[in-house]
């Protein structure tokens, strides 16, 4: 989520670097509008164990909860 990205240690550096280059908006606006998708992909890959794909979720140990949510 955006809040998770905003709270990670790397986001402080990214915001600092952006401000150093002339960006004057909020950290949330910067992350939502300007962060490269590869950063988001790296973040999701790092937490892949906690984020199952469709097949894993629908056939895993918590499948009843996933089916109910779907």
Image (tube, grey):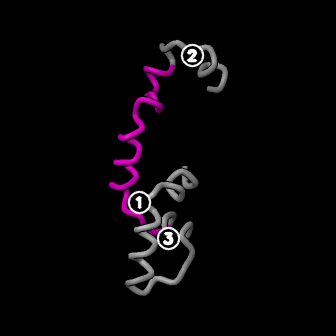
Q: Of the residues under marks 2 and 3, which one precedes in the sequence?
A: 3
Image location (x, y in percent) of residue 19: 45, 81
Q: Of the residues under marks 1 and 2, which one precedes in the sequence?
A: 1
Q: Which element carries disc 3, helix, strand or loop?
A: helix
Give the residue pinned by disc 1.
10
Image location (x, y in percent) of residue 60: 49, 14
Q: In 3D space, how far apart are the residues under numbered discs 2 and 3 (Cα atoms)?
A: 35 Å
Q: Which element carries disc 2, helix, strand or loop?
A: loop
Q: In 3D space, how far apart are the residues under numbered discs 3 and 1 (Cα atoms)?
A: 13 Å
Residue 60's label in the rendered image is none
Q: Residue at x 40, y 34 (%)?
A: 48
Among the 4 quarters of the image, the one containing residue 64: top right
Give the residue pinned by disc 2.
62
Image location (x, y in percent) of residue 20: 40, 83
Neighbours of disc 1 within 10 Å: few (<14), some (14-19), many (20+):
few
Is 62 rendered above or below residue 54? above
Is 49 rendered above or below residue 61? below
Q: Please report the bounds of the magenta region as a residue range.
A: 33-57
């Amino acid at each position: 989520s955006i809040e998770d990205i905003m709270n990670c240690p790397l986001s402080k550096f990214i915001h600092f670097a952006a401000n150093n280059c002339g960006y004057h908006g909020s950290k949330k606006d910067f992350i939502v509008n300007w962060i490269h998708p590869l950063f988001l992909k790296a973040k999701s890959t790092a937490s892949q164990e906690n984020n199952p794909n469709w097949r894993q979720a629908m056939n895993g140990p918590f499948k009843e909860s996933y089916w109910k949510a779907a």
